[in-house]
Image: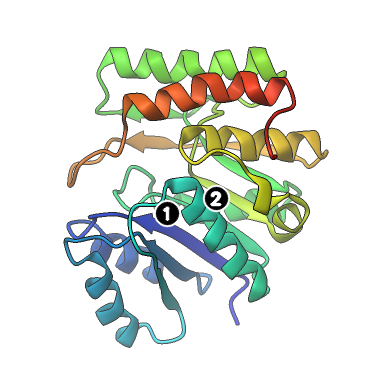
Amino acid sequence: MSDSLVIIPTYNEKGNIENIARKVMSLPGDLHLLVIDDGSPDGTAAIVKNMMKEFDGRMFIVERQGKLGLGTAYIAGFKWALARKYEYIFEMDADFSHNPDDLLRLKAACVNGADLAIGSRYVKGGDVKNWDMKRVLMSYFASVYVRTVLWINVKDTTAGFKCYRRRVLEALPLDTIKFIGYAFQIEMKYLTHKMGFKIAEVPINFIDREVGISKMSKGIFKEAFWGVLQMRMGKHGK
């Protein structure tokens, strides 16, 4: 059995899911893939289930009813992975903003001593493509804000391209994670840091999606802004 599982949450990703899945399946290392689909009305789940016949035993799906949020999708995926004894558990987007080739670099960072490897846009060698300057600055200074408030030495605090060692997810209080949007990504890193696990940042080139519609919203940013303050006051994970 593979020791590595890639988790991809989806909602209306029919234009991306087959291509991203085939790319992940083509990589060396016998990666497995779990899609968490939140009831996509565009037929995303049907595409995945058809591909599962081709990649029998390597590709899986969990179907949920309705759009329940990024954080809850990943937590469902983490629990699924832990129950099946995977050692390296990845998060990534379906839209090719995360280059699947970088999965191997993230795993290598964990094999070489990291407990959590983050695909980082804001360390030396990292970059962002196809964003206007306003969005680049908003994202960059959001990470500065998080580092300042939470005293955490992570450059890309909102990054969603990651590899966890199993022991991290076993230790974190998954049932009490509070946030569901970008604040979820921050909360997971903050708790990992607070519990003393080793975090490494691996430079990546982030490329904004070309197919489909972004899930970004003002509500997500608002949750992240106020969520960081709640974390600092110890009101996360409850």
Residue 25 on image: x %, y %: 39, 71
Q: Quadrant of residue 38?
A: bottom left
Q: Quadrant of residue 227?
A: top right
Label 1: few (<14), some (14–19) or many (≥20) C-alpha neighbours in 10 Å: few
Q: Residue at x 57, y 69 (%)?
A: 80
Residue 32 on image: x %, y %: 49, 72
Which quarter of the image is occupied by the C terminus?
A: top right
Please tell me which residue lies in front, 222 or 162: 222
Q: Residue at x 46, y 17 (%)?
A: 140
In contact (CB < 8 Å): disc 1 and disc 2: yes
Q: Coloured how? A: rainbow
Looking at numbered disc 1 in the image, what kind of residue is underneath it?
A: Asp
The label on residue 101 is: 1
How many marks do you count on the picture? 2
Q: Quadrant of residue 149?
A: top right
Q: CA distance from mark 1 to mark 2?
A: 8 Å
Please tell me which residue lies in front, 109 or 162: 162
In the picture, measured across the screen, residue 56 lies left or right of residue 17, that is: right
Residue 189 on image: x %, y %: 65, 37
Is any part of residue 18 visible from this angle?
yes
Residue 216 on image: x %, y %: 32, 33
In the picture, measured across the screen, residue 115 lies left or right of residue 186, that is: right
User: Which element type, helix, strand or loop, lies under badge 2?
Assistant: helix
Residue occupying the far right of the picture: 196
Which quarter of the image is occupied by the N terminus?
A: bottom right
Instruction: State the residue position of label 2.
Output: 105
Looking at numbered disc 2 in the image, what kind of residue is underneath it?
A: Arg
Please tell me which residue lies in front, 106 or 233: 233
